[in-house]
Image (cartoon, coloured by chain):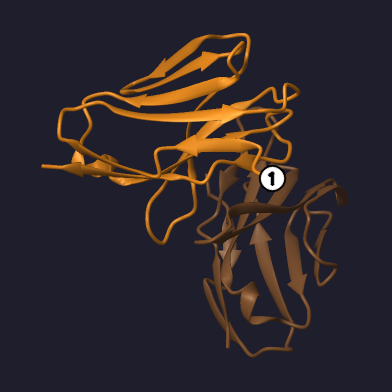
Amino acid sequence: QQQVKQSPQSLIVQKGGISIINCAYENTAFDYFPWYQQFPGKGPALLIAIRPDVSEKKEGRFTISFNKSAKQFSLHIMDSQPGDSATYFCAASMDSWGKLQFGAGTQVVVTP
Amino acid sequence: KAGVTQTPRYLIKTRGQQVTLSCSPISGHRSVSWYQQTPGQGLQFLFEYFSETQRNKGNFPGRFSGRQFSNSRSEMNVSTLELGDSALYLCASSSGQSGYTFGSGTRLTVV
């Protein structure tokens, strides 16, 4: 039973475009929602994280939008660059150092 | 500051054997978690340790075990290896303030 559902499975975007990845969760006890970026041969790297008391958080070109009532959150990558080509995972947990429930991942390809 | 170090990076084992993987967390991080990553199942939580105590355990058979030492270093052990145990095993550490930092993983192949 997947507690965090992520879409789309893959995404192709042109350089300079916006990449949008969506996630939905069921467990209202989740209190921490991070996004991870993973390159081939590497472990996931924490990109940005949000807690449910905030509706949006921006760090550089990466923005998380959070909709508590809909139990959904999304990652927006603005001005996408070829170096952003990677697999992105959303996750959720009860706190910032608890068990992470990961989404299935989205492979993003940014074309030059 | 050194990141999370996992050893070895690659490992090939035969069915039925056992294996031990090692993880050195970031200095000062007391929480260590382990995850299994496969193309079919994605990232799945194995267990989490804090101050040498297992706080959380995922839905894996008892062949998967772990421990944490007083210096926060952690090991995980898989006994009686099966072909389906082939995966990337990831260790992550946290201080509780800024989320989990992952290592590059150990790629285990069971033949």
Circle 1 Cα neighbour tier, 10 Å, few/some/many (<14 / 14–19 / ≥20): few
Left or right relative to B62: residue B74: left
Counting from the top left corner in percent of width and height, residue A19 is at 29, 30
Give the image location of residue B110, x and y in percent: 60, 83
Q: In which quadrant of the rendered view does residue A4 lie?
A: top right
Please state, as top left, top right, bottom left or bottom right, where the C terminus of chain A lies in the image: top left
Amino acid type indicated by mark 1: Gln
Image quadrant in which you'd find residue A11: top left
Relative to A94, B101 lies left or right: left
Q: Compared with residue A94, is residue B87 higher up or lower down, i.e. above or below?
A: below
Numbered-mark total: 1
Q: Residue at x 56, y 28 (%)?
A: A24
Q: Residue at x 72, y 41 (%)?
A: A99
Q: Secondary structure at mark 1?
A: loop
Q: In the rendered view, would you say A101 is above or below A49?
A: below
Q: Colour of chain B?
A: brown
- Expressed as whole percent of the image width and height from the top left, the position of residue B26 reads 62, 47
On screen, A23 above or below B100? above
Who is closer to the viewer here, B54 or A31?
A: A31
Residue lying furthest left in this view?
Answer: A112
- Residue placed most toward the observer, A92 or B105: A92
Q: Is residue B19 left or right of residue A40?
A: right
At 53% from the left edge and 61% from the top edge, which residue is drawn?
B40
Task: Tell me, by letter, which chain the rendering colours orange.
Answer: A
The residue labelled by disc 1 is A1
Place of residue B1 in the rendered image (x, y in percent of width and height, measured from the top left) = 52, 44
On the picture, is A89 further left or further right than B25?
left
The chain carrying label 1 is: A
